[in-house]
Amino acid sequence: MTFQFTKTGKKISAKFSVLGLNLSNNGSVCVMRDGKLAFYLESERITRKKRDHAIRSLLKYVHDIDAIAISDSYWTKDSKTLISSLDLNIVKNKFPDAKVYDYRAEHHKCHAASAFYNSGYDDAIAIVVDANGSKTDEGIEIESAFDIPSWKTLHKKYFSQNDMGIGKEFELCCIRHGWHHMDAGKVMGKASYGQSKVTSAPDGRADSHSMYKVNDCHRVQKKWERRALQLANLTDKDLVLVGGCFLNCTVNYMLKKKLGRKIYVEPISTDGGTSIGAAYLAKTEHT
């Protein structure tokens, strides 16, 4: 029995089982069997540590694997690097005969693969935007656009001191307001108050600090809306959208209204979803 994968022409054994690993934020594992996603679990569901990246607690749920597909993103914390290395060694020791497909240098491609192959589309542009992807010779990924299934890269943008990317702007906005740097949803929510919202102090005067917060969130949100529309207008093809920045319902609804074409937004747009993308990539690469 063989399985033909989304009009790429490649055929693989239906018994081929892939373990996808995400070693980044929202550490996760997935299992693909017989060409279908059979299992997905994030570390935080077991450890109860929000966005936990360590995956060793998930391995007891995984058995009978032919291949291992690995995803990660750029990190600067030595402790995280050490834990990820130890976790990966545990996986390899548990499945010593499994072939390893390493996509740690292709974080945005893993995001795009998860969204495209989950979308059911035969041909589309995948747009990926997040705070940071993989560190390459050109820099740290912050925006990507791929024409799939050819995988031609239409757009790439890398972090620079002059343009850190909208994902980092959301993070810094969170930090300015005393929130966790990954609580971007709070920025989106606060932005809905608009520019005129102020908080009155007990003496009736406007609280300038609260006014600043509302304006700051509104500014960052509107900047992302403008940038998202610019990226969407790079093409007139159907779109699949993925990456943490597209966990923004205001932006997604705006694009749906203005573009008038098919749009698929990947529900698991956090780094957790890249384990699924890595498994898809390994499955298409396997012969």
Image (spheres, rainbow, N blue to C red):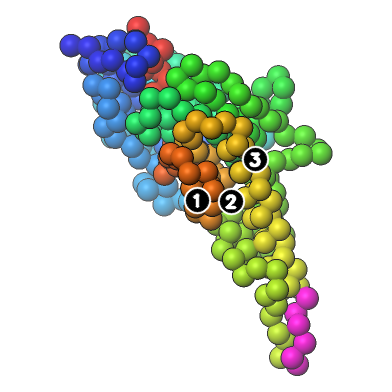
Residue 162 shown in magenta: no
Residue under pointer 1: 257
Residue at 24% over, 21% down? 34
Sequence-first tag of 3 and 1? 3
Whether residue 63 is visible, yes or no, is: yes
Other residues around mark 1 within 10 Å, as few (<14) / some (14–19) / many (≥20): few
Residue under pointer 3: 230
Q: Nearer the viewer, mark 3 or mark 1?
A: 1
Whether residue 211 is situated above or below residue 145 in the rendered picture: below
Q: Secondary structure at mark 2?
A: loop
- Percent coordinates x, y for residue 177 in the rendering: 68, 63
Residue under pointer 2: 182
Sequence-first tag of 3 and 2? 2
Span colored in magenta? 203-208
Q: Secondary structure at mark 1?
A: helix
Alpha-carbon distance for marks 1 and 2?
A: 27 Å
Whether the residues at callouts 3 and 1 have beta carbons within 8 Å, the answer is no
- Percent coordinates x, y for residue 271 in the rendering: 50, 38
- Position of 163 compared to 268: left or right? right
Q: At label 3, which amino acid type do we have? A: Gln
Other residues around mark 2 within 10 Å, as few (<14) / some (14–19) / many (≥20): some
Alpha-carbon distance for marks 3 and 1?
A: 15 Å
Alpha-carbon distance for marks 3 and 2?
A: 24 Å
Residue at 41% over, 44% down? 267
Q: At label 2, which amino acid type do we have? A: Met
Other residues around mark 3 within 10 Å, as few (<14) / some (14–19) / many (≥20): few
- Position of 77 compared to 10: left or right? right
Of 105 and 87, nearer the camera is: 105
Q: Residue furthest left?
A: 1
For the C terminus, give its image quadrant. top left
